[in-house]
Image (cartoon, rainbow, N blue to C red):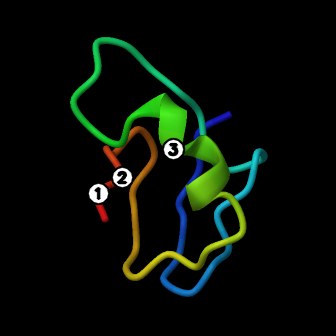
Amino acid sequence: MCKIISAGEIFSEENLTVKRPGGGISPMRWDEIIGTPATRNYLPDEMITL
């Protein structure tokens, strides 16, 4: 389910998903991203960039 991710919210399996075609963060970096805080607000379905 897509939802807004607020700045400071921790990225988790509940608020992230992998989609194709690629263009954002590689799914190979999934474990690097989970547990880190969002640096800004993200809208539903917006591509995450670090």
* 1, 10: nearer the viewer: 10
Q: Are marks 1 and 2 in contact (CB under 8 Å)?
A: yes
At x 64%, y 63%, the residue is 11
Front label number (3 vs 1): 3
Q: How many marks?
A: 3
Furthest residue toward top: 21
Report helix, strand or loop for mark 3: helix
Residue 35 image point, x, y percent: 72, 69
The disc label shown at residue 29, or none: 3
Where is residue 39, by image quadrant? bottom left
Specify which label sits upstream in the sequence, 3 or 1. 3
The disc label shown at residue 49, or none: 1
Report helix, strand or loop for mark 1: loop
Furthest residue toward right: 14
Report helix, strand or loop for mark 2: loop
Q: In which quadrant is the N terminus drawn?
A: top right
At x 73%, y 56%, the residue is 12
Q: 10 Å neighbourhood of mark 2: few (<14), some, or many (≥20)?
A: some
Which residue, given by chain and number where applicable, does mark 2 sit on? 48
At x 51%, y 44%, the residue is 29
Give the amino acid at mark 3: Arg
The disc label shown at residue 40, or none: none
The residues bearing labels 3 and 2 have C-alpha atoms spaced at a distance of 12 Å
Specify which label sits upstream in the sequence, 3 or 2. 3
Give the amino acid at mark 1: Thr
* 41, 29: nearer the viewer: 29
At x 40%, y 74%, the residue is 41
Where is residue 30, by image quadrant? top right
Residue 31 image point, x, y percent: 66, 49
Residue 6 image point, x, y percent: 53, 76
